[in-house]
Amino acid sequence: MALLPILTIPDNRLKVKAKPVANVDGRVAALMDDMLETMYRAPGIGLAAPQVGVHERIIVVDLSEPGQARKAPLLMANPRLILSSDEQSTYEEGCLSVPEVYAEVSRPAQVKVRYVDRGGEERELEADGLLATCIQHEIEHLDGVLFIDHLSALKRNMIVRKLSKLKRAG
Ligand code: GNR
Ligand code: NI
């Protein structure tokens, strides 16, 4: 297992659309394990492959509290939403690629996601609450979209400028 460096904005690699995984083989399973370890260490509740510079449609999610036993991480290849509720819910979101920025985002409250698991099996999951929000946040990373893209251009530009400055300052 290995920890992977997490890219932060501004970085054009976060804007690239990721490619579908053809086969969930040993290489992909190992990448999922490394992503999970990286996410736990960060710590975060989700991580998408583009955040570690890999442009493949892979996400990992685990909503357990940091420090608690992590029982059921979700490891997904090619996740796609097959249902999204009309009902919306709003959460204060953060992102490991947008450090120390938090903002409210509204998204469908309930979703159904179809994906291929670590063993190569096709599965479906119904999610609501923070899990639904997190899965949508991760799937958007696969399309090069960040949660700040849901904010006004004014707010987004302020955030990008601030983080650019911090990055230049090292
Ligand atoms: O750790 C994370 N917390 C979080 C909180 C609310 C909504 C989404 C998230 S995902 C984020 C980790 C991350 O950047 N995943 O891409
Ligand atoms: Ni994120």
Image (cartoon, grey):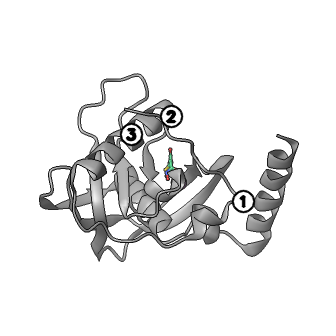
- Whether disc 2's CB lies below 8 Å from ligand 1 is answered yes
In terms of depth relative to the viewer, which is nearer, 137 or 33?
33
The residue shown at (29%, 50%) is 27
Question: Quick check: 31 left or right of 3?
Answer: left
The residue shown at (30%, 43%) is 30
Nearer the camera: disc 1 or disc 2: 1
Q: Residue at label 1?
A: 10
Q: Residue at label 2?
A: 43
Label 3 residue SS: helix
- Whether disc 3's CB lies below 8 Å from ligand 1 is answered no
The residue shown at (45%, 49%) is 47
In terms of depth relative to the viewer, which is nearer, 158 or 164?
164
Q: Position of residue 29 (x, y in %)?
A: 26, 47
Question: Quick check: 133 left or right of 126?
Answer: right
Earlier sequence position, callout 3 versus callout 1 = 1
Nearer the camera: disc 3 or disc 1: 3
Label 2 residue SS: loop
Quadrant where the image shows the C terminus: top right
Label 1: few (<14), some or many (≥20) within 10 Å? some
Identified by mark 1, the residue type is Pro
The answer for how far apart the CA atoms under marks 3 and 1 are is 23 Å
Question: Quick check: 99 left or right of 88?
Answer: right
Q: Residue at label 3?
A: 34
Question: Quick check: 145 left or right of 63?
Answer: right
Quadrant where the image shows the N terminus: top left
The answer for how far apart the CA atoms under marks 1 and 2 are is 21 Å
Nearer the camera: disc 2 or disc 3: 3
Identified by mark 2, the residue type is Pro
